[in-house]
Amino acid sequence: IEDDEMTRIFKISTVLLSIIAFAHGEGRCDAVNTYTCPTCGGLEVSDCLQCDGYFNTDTKHRICYDRKLFGKHEEKDHEFHYPHLWSDVIGAFIWFMVAGIATACGVGGGGIYVPLGIILLRFASKPASGLSQASIFGASLGGFILNIRNQHPDMKIRDTIGSRDEVGKIVPYERNKSRAEIKTSEEEYLAKNGSEESYQRQFYTRPLIDFDMALFLAPMEMAGAVLGVIIQALVPNWLFLSLAVLVLAVTSLKTYQKFISSYKKDRENQQATILAEEEEDKLGEKSIGEKSVEDEMRIPEVATEAVEDDELKLSMRRKLLAEDARQYPTEKLFYLVILWVGLAVITFLKGGKGVESLVGITCKSPWFAIFITFQFLWTFGFAAVFGMKLLKRHELKVSCHYPLHQNDVMWDAGKLRFYASFTFAAGVVAGLIGIGGGMVLGPLMLVLGIHPRVSSATTATMIVMTSSSVAIMFVTSGLVPWKYALFFFCICFCGAIVGKKYIDAYVRRTGMASILIGILATIIALATVGCCVILLINLGKDDWCFDSFKEFCVVKDKTDSLECLSR
């Protein structure tokens, strides 16, 4: 983000903090924002999330009610059954469509699910955030099932040393060559066996998902999500939506700028390929030494350097290529499962609002803070271990002249720190405003040059880990009806499977990977507008009252429950 953008963000943040300070000293919001809770004879609460079993807010009648999936209208019983049949049906169709498009772009779609959950499904802000996480989990899981079977866009990686650019990455063998020239080059490569008679040359590839990157970044995003959920419990709804608008607006701008540059590059590549094919039909028409228009429009050659090779480096290079070529690296998948299970166990041991701890502690117990610390130690420790492994493996690749792709990351200590900190921030945003983190992390990867398809697949894998963890916290706390969570999980799972399949096929056929970036920018922009509209509508209904922060720890007295039951 540029300096002028950072200045604008700082000014906006200052204004928001000033409003918070004003609202904290202003008492009139307490009188406006009160709702009747059906439990205990009709208690008055400032937030329906304080009303057990009736977490949804009816601002018209100023009451809290229990939400039913496909609920039908029943006269005289509006506190319990609201007419949501058509809202749920239309919502299911929209969720299905959004899941396919968002998953293909490597995001969960939470920036769309949250505002639509509030406007269309009429959930309160925080329950809509929880439903969004369940939806993201379904969509990202469907995308993961498809992504794990797909291969890297470069499906013909060679074990030869090739030509290198100034940073040590392989210069594509196909650059500025016609199809006939590429075919001849591939045949010559396969025809030349190594010095070992038993070795037969082959082309290598990689999975579409960068598992090494996912093992390093996923725990950082999950750690951020833990912090985001903690912060969300404190902030009022208006601030929650304001932060969402701020983050999504900046992200949309940066993503659209990346789309413009990527689209131009894709068009240039397409034009170069077409011209190269046309030249095949013009053999003999151009005299020696004559420079044609087609030559002028070809992609300029990059500076290359000659690199010496030896048998030891060649052997190590082939070993690394063979390891990376495994489509299903079982040990890496196992480590991801261990990461998820470990965090889930700690979360259930800790407990929280509406969730009884497995060891019987409350948020006032010292052990509550200790378990929160364990959550961060587990995720940060996991990231540290696999970050060091990632760095050492990259150094080994560089030493043996591994054919690093033009879109691969050149890892070093600085890159590790930058990616880790930014991913942690993406996780905080994910837990705070109910998105999967891909709307923040995806654009970052694209700006840093990672291939759009690899970026979307790797980000989607990380979103599976993050969204599933956060969704479990929301559902078990009762903030989201489990039937809604399960239904929209299934809808988004199916939508992701269908939509991503067709969008990926189009990108492979046309080579226009920039289309994914354009769709992503549009999704984020629509989400920004949606959150802004909801913020203004909600503030208008509440007579423009800006309530202050919530209490972090509220433990209900058992005597209060007994008195309530005896009424």
Image (cartoon, rainbow, N blue to C red):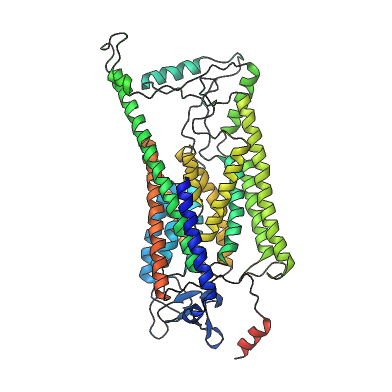
Determine the residue positioned at 34% across, 26% down.
272
Can residue 480 be seen at all in this image of the molecule?
no
Q: Position of residue 190 (x, y in %)?
A: 50, 18
Which of the pair 254/106 is nearer the observer?
254
Location of the C terminus (image quadrant)? bottom right
- Seen from this angle, which residue lies furthest top? 288
| Residue 470 vertical placement versus 50 (above, below) | above
Q: Residue at x 52, y 14 (%)?
A: 192
Left-right relation of 146 to 315: left
Whether residue 479 is situated above or below residue 418 in the rendered picture: below
Position above or below: 189 against 214: above
Name the outermost residue toward the right. Answer: 366
145, 516: nearer the viewer: 516
Question: Would residue 388 be found to the left or right of residue 465 on screen?
Answer: right
Percent x, y of residue 481 = 51, 69
Query: Looking at the image, which is closer to me, 456 or 490?
Result: 456
Where is residue 343, by image quadrant? bottom right
Q: Position of residue 344 (x, y in %)?
A: 64, 58
Residue 544, image x and y in percent? 42, 73
Residue 560 visible in the snapshot: yes
The residue at the point 32 percent across, 24 percent down is 297
Mark count: 0
Horizontal side of residue 477 vs 185, given as left or right:
right
Left/right placement of residue 287 relative to residue 404 reads left
Q: Residue furthest bottom?
A: 567
